[in-house]
């Protein structure tokens, strides 16, 4: 069987996991996404994305950055599913369980987050997207610590369940940027899967990590524990609100705009503006600019949620 072959090549054994190899995969991932960025830049941005943009350069950057995040979500999301399929025993001990298959996936994600943080620096968006900056610093430092100590790697695997949802979340925004109609079947289907995977992949993942902190907190370093506690507290406060926003924007949008339009007409006497692609012109496609990209990586997202 394929699963037997995988587990024999990548056994559950700390001794066969190389920290130097993890660093190598991490650095290789940074190089890979830099090359991919150049390729996407060379190919160019779809005309529909920048056609009506006020700042075409800014919109082009958003497209490229989002597309690379989508690729990362596809790779790691699929990889993450295989981790649970090939190693169902992973749930027995999320602190000590480790295999090259799971370890190097975490190394890949660590490399991607480092690349993306570097992209923010190059684009001078570190302060503008400060929530994302803090997220990347926290996640990268914790992932890097786990790579170095070879502990809690399985908890990272649980956390990376969020990338399964991120694939559909990013697909949603990519379709919006390409002017897909809100009523189109592919958009509606993706919106539904997005909500379902949000509930399970993000909700369950955060719940399991929070539970683990309560019952297994004494097994990790105190600094690591308190850093994780702060991150999880914020995440558990934010994600329910983000789910409501997605639900409202994708499934309650019609009633929402109807009420908003009536209030606008009563208050100002202005005429009703036409709806384009299911989006009201007065509603920003980045309705959560401070949260945008964090949602996709496990906290929130500024140009990745509408």
Image (spheres, rainbow, N blue to C red):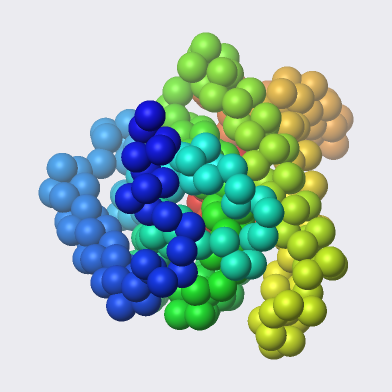
What residue is shown at x 79% (from left), y 79% (from top)? 218
Quadrant in the rendering for residue 5: top left
Which of the two residues, 131 or 5, is positioned nearer the viewer here? 5
Q: State which quarter of the image contains the C terminus.
A: top right
Q: Residue furthest top?
A: 185
Q: Nearer the viewer, residue 68 or 22?
A: 22
Query: Residue 18 placed where, x, y %?
Result: 34, 73
* Image: 125 above or below 104: below
Snapshot quadrant of residue 79: top left
Residue at left 16%, top 50%?
39
Q: Is residue 10 visible?
A: yes
Asked whether the viewer can see residue 75, the reply is no
Relative vertical location of residue 231 with respect to residue 77 in this rendering, above or below? below
Residue located at (54% from left, 24% from top): 190
From the image, which quarter does the N terminus lie in? Answer: top left
Is residue 128 positioned above or below 248 on the image? below
Task: Please identify the residue farthest to the left as the structure is shown.
Answer: 42
Left or right of 170 in this view: 260: right
């Amino acid at each position: 069987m394929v699963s037997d072959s995988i587990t024999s090549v990548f056994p559950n054994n700390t001794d066969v996991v190389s920290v130097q190899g993890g660093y190598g995969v991490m650095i290789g991932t940074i190089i890979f996404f830099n090359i991919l960025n150049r390729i996407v830049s060379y190919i160019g941005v779809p005309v529909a994305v920048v056609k009506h943009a006020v700042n075409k350069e800014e919109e082009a950057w958003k497209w490229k950055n989002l597309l690379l995040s989508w690729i990362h979500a596809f790779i790691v999301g699929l990889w993450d599913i295989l981790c649970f399929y090939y190693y169902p025993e992973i749930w027995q001990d999320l602190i000590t369980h480790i295999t090259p298959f799971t370890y190097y996936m975490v190394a890949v994600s660590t490399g991607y987050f480092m690349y993306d943080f570097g992209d923010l620096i190059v684009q001078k968006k570190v302060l503008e997207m400060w929530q994302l900056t803090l997220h990347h610093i926290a996640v990268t430092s914790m992932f890097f610590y786990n790579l170095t100590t070879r502990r809690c790697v399985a908890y990272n695997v649980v956390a990376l369940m969020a990338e399964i949802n991120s694939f559909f979340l990013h697909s949603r925004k990519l379709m919006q940027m390409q002017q897909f109609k809100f009523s189109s079947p592919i958009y509606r289907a993706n919106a539904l899967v997005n909500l379902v995977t949000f509930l399970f992949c993000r909700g369950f993942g955060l719940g399991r990590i929070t539970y683990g902190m309560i019952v297994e907190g004494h097994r990790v370093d105190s600094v690591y524990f308190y850093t994780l506690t702060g991150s999880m507290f914020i995440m558990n406060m934010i994600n329910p609100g983000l789910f409501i926003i997605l639900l409202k924007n994708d499934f309650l949008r019609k009633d929402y705009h109807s009420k908003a339009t009536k209030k606008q007409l009563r208050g100002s006497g202005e005429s009703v503006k036409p709806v384009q692609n299911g989006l009201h012109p007065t509603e920003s496609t980045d309705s959560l600019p401070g949260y945008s990209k964090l949602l996709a990586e496990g906290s929130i997202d500024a140009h990745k949620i509408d």
